[in-house]
Structures are given as structure tokens and as C-alpha cells.
Image (cartoon, rainbow, N blue to C red):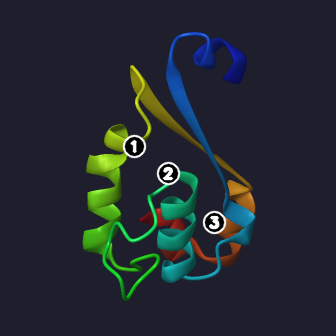
Amino acid sequence: MLEELQGQDIAIFEIDGATIHSEKDLYKKVAIVFKMPEGWYGPLEKYATNPNAFLEYLEDVSEWVPAKNHAVFLYGATKLWKNHPQIAGW
């Protein structure tokens, strides 16, 4: 499936849900996987770990990762749901 999507000019982002242990982990991993430019959120925070920044990442990712479409694959989702259901539910 990944190869088929990549052949259609779709940017693929992969996150290991098993490594997410807090809301801040989720926000940081999204910023990293979306290839957020350093200093994008300001000089004091390398990765903004709040819901507003998360929504901005989703809106702005197409600016620094140009593609026809974007897709996020979450691996380890079972472990994330088991260990942190509230975070997985977000």
C-alpha cells in the first residue's frame, strides 16, 4: 500500500504509536515526522507541545512537504490504545 501511494505523489508519514506515552510525545512526534522546519514555532520552542500547534502542523505541512496529498500511518496502535486510550482517542 505504501509503495502504491508514494507512486501517486502522496507524502507518507509514519508514527510508531507504541512510543507515545503522553500528549506531549504525540505532539513532538507529529512535528518531527511532518519535518517541521526548525524555529517554525519560535526561537524558544523547538517543538510546540500543545493542541494549537498540532492543528497548525496539520494545516501547514503541505508548505514544507509539497505533495498532491498527505497520509499518516500509525503503527503500534494496539499498544497505544492499550496503554494510553485517552491519547489514542484524540
Q: Amino acid at mark 1?
A: Trp
Q: Residues within 10 Å of mark 1 (few under 14, many from 20)?
A: few
Residue 81's disc number: 3
Give the CA distance from mark 3 to mark 2.
22 Å
Q: CA distance from mark 2 to mark 1?
A: 8 Å
Camera-near label (2 vs 1) is 1
On screen, 27 above or below 8?
below
Measure how far apart labels 1 and 3 are at the Cα level: 30 Å
Q: Are marks 1 and 3 in contact (CB under 8 Å)?
A: no
Residue carrying label 1: 64
Say which residue appears at 41% left-offset and 65% top-offset. 90
Q: Of residues 76 and 81, which is closer to you in this image?
A: 76
Among the two numbered marks 2 and 1 on one chain, the one whose residue lies closer to the N terminus:
2
> Along the horizontal axis of the image, is 8 left or right of 57?
right
Residue 21 place in picture, x, y as percent: 64, 80
Task: Name the residue rendered at 74%, 56% in the picture.
Answer: 76
